[in-house]
Amino acid sequence: MKKRTTSTVRKTAKPARTVKKDPSLEFAKMVAHAAAKIKAKDVHILDLSKLATFTDYFVIASGGSDRQVEAIADSVITEMKKKGKRPIGSEGYDSSQWIIIDFGDVVAHIFYQPLRELYAIEKLWSDARRVRVKL
């Protein structure tokens, strides 16, 4: 009968992976939080970085009335200005049904809920990865 020998194998710890933070994603999350602060509904972040060249992320949110849509958009702009980010431009304040706020690497779409369902922007960009965000 052969004698069993036990050898001690030392496991070496693998070096910790450093996760590189995406500043555009962090900014998109700040935009989402600013929208949620005014009780925006169905706040989503879509990652377009591999699909589009004009922006990296969409932040999509809804309001229950044209006044709420405008209040959400105002909150986003005000909160981002406090953080030193000013929008390149905005559209839609005249009707407050769909307000777009362009920050360059992040574009916020604030919809009046029935219009969001009509345009179905998430379906249009269905190839985009959805980013989870805790609100």
Image (spheres, rainbow, N blue to C red):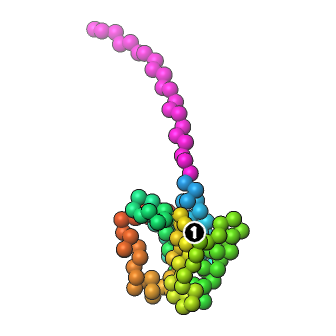
The C terminus - image quarter: bottom right
The N terminus - image quarter: top left
Q: Is residue 114 above or below residue 9?
A: below
Which residue is found at the position 50% from the left and 32% from the top?
A: 14
Q: Is residue 8 magenta?
A: yes
Q: Residue furthest left?
A: 1
Q: Quadrant of residue 53?
A: bottom left
Which residue is found at the position 58% from the left and 75% from the top?
A: 89
Q: Residues within 10 Å of mark 1 (few under 14, many from 20)?
A: many
Which residue is found at the position 45% from the left and 86% from the top?
A: 115
Amino acid on which disc 1 is placed: Phe
Q: Quadrant of residue 67?
A: bottom right
Q: Position of residue 19 (x, y in %)?
A: 54, 46
Q: Is residue 74 left or right of residue 102?
A: right
SS at badge 1: loop
Q: Position of residue 104 (x, y in %)?
A: 55, 66
Q: Which secondary structure class fits the magenta region best?
A: loop
Q: Position of residue 82 (x, y in %)?
A: 71, 68
Q: Position of residue 91 (x, y in %)?
A: 54, 82
Q: Quadrant of residue 22?
A: bottom right
Q: Which residue is mark 1?
A: 103
Q: Is residue 71 above or below residue 51?
A: below
- Is 75 or 9 nearer to us in this picture? 75
Q: Is residue 83 left or right of residue 28?
A: right
For the question of whether residue 120 can be seen, the reply is yes
Q: Is residue 62 left or right of residue 38?
A: left
Q: Which residues are magenta?
A: 1-21
